[in-house]
Image: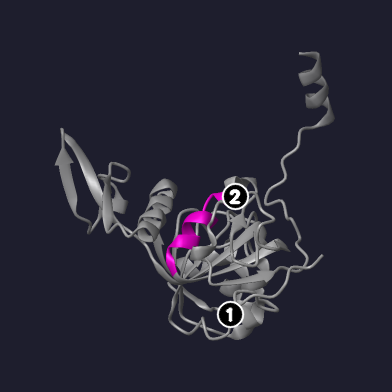
Amino acid sequence: MAAKSSSKVYADAASALKGAVKDGMTLMCGGFGACGIPENLIDALRASGVRNLTVVSNNAGLDGVGLGLLLQTRQIRKMISSYVGENKEFERQYLAGELQIEFNPQGTLAERIRAGGAGIYGFYTKVGAGTEVAKGKETRIVDGETYVLETGLTADVSLVKAWKGDTEGNLIYRMTARNFNPNMATAARVTIAEVEQLVEPGTLDPNSIHTPGIFVQRIIQGASYTKLIEKRTVRKREEQANAVVA
């Protein structure tokens, strides 16, 4: 049975983005490779034509998948990312000087987003000390160790993907989709969520909710999902047989 309408529920991705996205904004986009990405919202963002975006995301999707679609249309001006090794267009634009990149160690990126959502200005970490990551940043020596000051990250809009949500915006994520989505949902002025299943309030187990609805301003029931595997790795039959024998 379909969930009833509420002020947070929008008919589709395009209407959910309307009035919230604009040129030159800072955007957070959840997911990890092809897992847990807000596919419908990204497609609608591409169709909207907004440009000069600064995007905070673990990576920029794959070629032709996720944020890779926005790279194809040159809608992204700058990426604040951790891992970009699976995207040839990302590499091409960066090496050609067409795309700005602010690289972050993956744990640092996650903590910067968490800090932004918690209202924390910054934190000191040993990660990156003495490397290119620390250039231009404040450092401090504590107990003989050098720490780098990293500042919290916030955005105008966060786009997140959840497995299940209710019409009040309470969200539950599945497995790897929990990596960046929950923190990003707390760190933006407007959080827009898409879910695979949209249900009535009271349906979700309160103990299973990862993102409380207070952080979510808009929500949609997503359409079909491709469930891509970023890189399939399998063993040959001989190796499997040997593993069984061993």
Front-lying residue, 194 or 54: 194
Badge 2 density bin: few <14, some 14–19, many ≥20, Cα 10 Å: few
Q: Secondary structure at mark 1?
A: helix
- Tell me the CA gap for discs 2 and 1: 28 Å
State the residue at coordinates (69%, 75%).
5
Q: Position of residue 122 (x, y in %)?
A: 27, 55
- Which image quadrant for residue 175? top right
Name the front one of labels 2 and 1. Answer: 2
Residue sitting at the far front: 202
In the rendered image, residue 1, in percent from the top left (x then y), is placed at 82, 65
Along the line of sight, which residue is nearer the eye, 183 or 198? 198
- In the rendering, at what x and y percent does residue 218 appear? 58, 73
Q: Secondary structure at mark 2?
A: helix
Residue 65 in magenta stretch: no
Check disc 1 and report the residue beneath it: 17
- Dot 1 amino acid type: Leu
Identity of the amino acid at label 2? Pro
Task: Tell which circle, 2 or 1, labels the residue nearer the N-terminal end.
Answer: 1
Q: Is residue 222 visible?
A: yes
Depth check, front residue: 242 or 139: 139
Instruction: Tell me, yes or no, if residue 84 can be seen here.
Output: no
- Is 231 displayed left or right of 106 in the figure? right
Q: Residues within 10 Å of mark 1 (few under 14, many from 20)?
A: many
Q: Is residue 179 magenta?
A: yes
Q: Quadrant of residue 194?
A: bottom right
Indicate the quadrant where residue 78 lies: bottom left
x and y percentages locating residue 126 in the rendered image:
28, 41
Per the rendered image, the range of residues in magenta is 178-188
Asked whether the beta carbons under mark 2 and mark 1 sit within 8 Å of each other, the answer is no
Q: Which residue is mark 2?
A: 206
